[in-house]
Amino acid sequence: MQQGEPVDTGIKPETLVGEKPVETKPESNSENRADFVYQNLQELISFAAELNLPPEKITKFVYKIRETAEKLHLNVLSLVKENEFLHYQLTHEPKTELLNMLGFTEEIKKYFASGEYQKTENKLRSTMNGCFVFIDLNGMKGLNDQFGYDETDRIIERFAMLSKELRVYDIPARRSNNGDEFVIFLPKANPALAGQIIARRIYKILLDAPITGVNIAGETEEVPITYVVGVEPCSPTHPDPINEPEKFASYLQEKINNAGELEKIAKKSLGTEHDRVAVSYRNSDGSVVTTDQAELLRGLVN
């Protein structure tokens, strides 16, 4: 018999472990588990035979290998799940479960590093770049005085839930824990329209289903939500997230900061205490356009 050739012991793997794997945990993938535990089982039996073990000890030997492999596999599954949980906590804001800035950056890198984007011809990539939308809630001091800090935090969290109204591939995030600023990356979006569409959508939702809060007197009342939106387009070209990760991270931070500056410009157009929304966006030529509430809501059906 040549070295490495399996020894025919007459013992078949299925006589020891059965035809199919037996699930010990519902979340285990039976196919992967079978591959992990039973791969090269015949070689194990042959190896045991080369040790001149009698058949009954071969059986015991293989059972022990199986038991050890099962425990190892379940430990790996546990570690994977624990790692996923820790990664989720690391990349999400706890109260709203929106992405934090670390998770936001990570998801945008994934988009620009994706096969769909990388395979797109350079001359067409500008149509996929999209824009950054910065949303800031105004009048937090007044809300704190009216509703108290804890209730104001809950009001902000309810506002954050409006991010569920976005497209499935849009990427919303809360800029800081307990903060009143939000940033959204909109792939394949026109900057001149994106901010206005989001601002109108939020306004219409709040019109149909106003956010309410319990004021310091213990009374429930509608919350006068005021928000401004800044929209910064992605550059036609930018650092590669795969080959230039540090430069790409700096690029993202610059774009987010620019969107924040545009939001401040929009805030200046809030003329009266009754104004609730305004939008500023940057054109491809660098000029800034601001849309006030009257123009923004013109034609919006109540």
Image: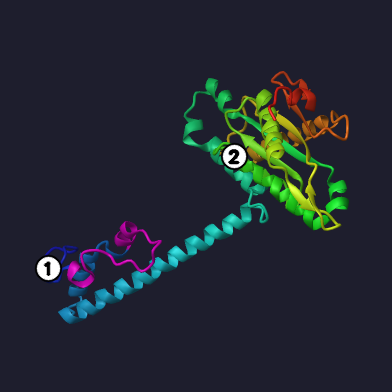
Q: Closer to the camera, 55 or 139?
A: 139
| Image location of residue 44, percent across then percent down | 23, 68
Q: Secondary structure at mark 1?
A: loop
Q: Residue at x 53, y 60 (%)?
A: 83
Q: Residue at x 83, y 46 (%)?
A: 140
**Left or right placement of residue 116 versus residue 19 in this view:** right
- Between the residue at mark 2 and the residue at mark 1, the CA separation in whole angstroms equals 56 Å
From the image, state whether disc 2 or disc 1 is nearer to you. Answer: 2
Q: Closer to the camera, 188 or 50?
A: 188
Residue identified by numbered label 2: 108
Tell me the colour scheme of the image: rainbow
175 in the magenta segment: no
31 in the magenta segment: yes
Task: For label 2, count other residues whose C-alpha is less than 10 Å away and answer few (under 14), some (14-19) or many (20+).
Answer: some
Task: For label 1, count other residues whose C-alpha is less than 10 Å away and answer few (under 14), some (14-19) or many (20+).
Answer: few
Q: Residue at x 74, y 53 (%)?
A: 154
Residue identified by numbered label 1: 8
- Three-letter residue code for mark 1: Asp
Q: Closer to the camera, 169 or 299?
A: 299
| Image location of residue 248, percent across then percent down | 63, 37
Dot placed on the residue nearer the N-terminal end, 2 or 1: 1
Mark seen at residue 217? none
Tag count: 2
| Image location of residue 13, percent across then percent down | 19, 67
Q: Closer to the camera, 241 or 6?
A: 241
Asked if one can make out residue 5 in the rendered structure from this viewpoint, the answer is: yes
Q: Which residues are magenta?
A: 13-36
Q: Is residue 268 above or below residue 217?
A: above
Q: Residue at x 63, y 36 (%)?
A: 185
Check the picture and name the quadrant holding the C terminus. Answer: top right
